Amino acid sequence: MSTREDAFVTHVLDQLDAVGPVSARAMFGGFGLYLRGVMFALIADETLYFKTDAANRAAFEEAGMAPFVYENKGRKVAMSYHEAPPDSLEDKEALAELARGAYAAAQRAKAAGPRRPRGRRSA
């Protein structure tokens, strides 16, 4: 992790201290942000993305915030995480509100279970 990445992650964690014991774990060149064992946000290329679903996605889209997109086998894949509005990074209350909504979305996703069955299919 570069010094700049370290500073950004530290800044985000400091801004989220009112939400609870948020931790960052390195993953796939970025970081997953966890609260009580549930991943609700990610940081990639010094950009914060929050978990979204039908309950909170509209607020991000109305603000013009794009989803997190990665490339897999030549295809672009959009995930259910949206970029945090840049001004929210300096507003602890606004960031905490977004984080609480993202945590709720992550809990709903976790309760719904996996979207695809894992393992082998029987014929």
Image: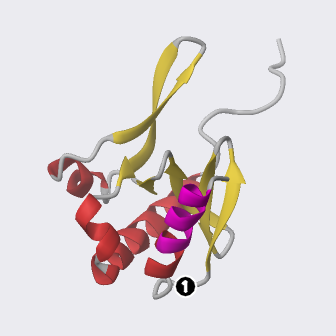
Residue 109 placed where, x, y %?
Answer: 53, 54
The image quadrant of residue 87 is: bottom left
Residue that numbered label 1 is attached to:
20
The image quadrant of residue 15 is: bottom left
**Viewer-proximal residue among 106 and 46:** 46
Classify mark 1: residues with Cα within 10 Å, few (<14), some (14-19) or many (20+): few
- Quadrant for the C terminus, please: top right
Query: Does residue 16 sit above or below 50 in this rendering?
Result: below
**Viewer-proximal residue among 109 and 10:** 10
The stretch of residues the image draws in magenta is 3-11
Residue 89 placed where, x, y %?
Answer: 34, 68
Tell whether position 9 is magenta.
yes
Residue 72 seen in render: yes
Query: Does residue 78 sit above or below 36 in this rendering?
Result: above
> Magenta stretch mostly in which secondary structure?
helix
Q: Indicate how the structure is coloured in the image.
A: secondary structure
Query: Does residue 121 sit above or below 35 in this rendering?
Result: above
Q: Residue furthest bottom?
A: 18
Residue 5 placed where, x, y %?
Answer: 56, 56
Residue 53 seen in render: no
At a point 59% along the width and 38% down the height, the residue shown is 115
At a point 49% along the width and 45% down the height, the residue shown is 45
In what element is the residue under mark 1? loop
Q: Residue furthest left?
A: 62
At a point 71% along the width and 33% down the height, the residue shown is 117
